[in-house]
Amino acid sequence: MIFQYVAVLYMGLCPMQRNTILIIFCPMPRKRLIYIVILIVLVLFASFIFYRTRLSGPASTKSNVFSAVFLLNDQVYFGQITKETDNEIVLRNVYYLKANATVDTQSSEENAANVKLSLVKLGDELHNPEDWMIINRDHVLFIERLRPQGTIMDAIRKYQKEE
């Protein structure tokens, strides 16, 4: 019978040293060695897959799909989610709504009707930021995917055609 020597961390695998938990070297039959190596490879593979999916976010996240990210401060950002983790969301191709109010001496209810919303592309501001943002997950109220035929998507397509 052919024996291989393997480092064992588990108590009881080596029949010669049953009461030790230390790393020991003991003779092991080839069949048992193959099972242990297969088990280790499967655990490493499962760990890799789990780690990779945790970093890339949910499988449904597609960079060409637009989403609305609603924040706790009542701000809403529209864009493509390119990365989601437990702590942050990376949003690219970002747009947001800006209220353009006209000042009137009428009542507040009539002033509310005079507020016009316009879609603004991130990067068109005075300080000229890049067109992506990292949003702290603690500040997110909820996220919705936008349908291609929605009003916001129509405005985004119109903006993209004008550029």
Image (tube, rainbow, N blue to C red):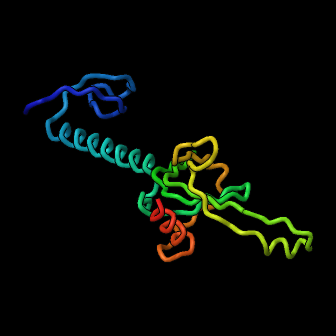
Horizontally, is 65 left or right of 107 in the view? left
The residue shown at (38%, 27%) is: 19
In front of the other: 33 or 63: 63
Q: Position of residue 120 (x, y in %)?
A: 60, 58
Asked if residue 31 lies left or right of residue 110, the reply is left
Q: Nearer the viewer, residue 127 or 145?
A: 127
Quadrant of residue 117 in the image?
bottom right
| Number of numbered markers | 0
Residue at image point 51% right, 48% down? 131
Q: Quadrant of residue 64?
A: bottom left
* Residue drawn at point x = 87 percent, y = 75 percent: 109
Residue sitting nearer the eye, 54 or 13:
54
Where's residue 63, x and y in %?
42, 57
Quadrant where the N terminus lies?
A: top left
Q: Is residue 14 left or right of residue 93?
A: left
Viewer-proximal residue among 95 and 91: 95
Residue 159: % across, % down: 51, 63
Residue 56: image location, x then y, percent:
43, 49
Q: Is residue 10 above or below residue 98?
A: above
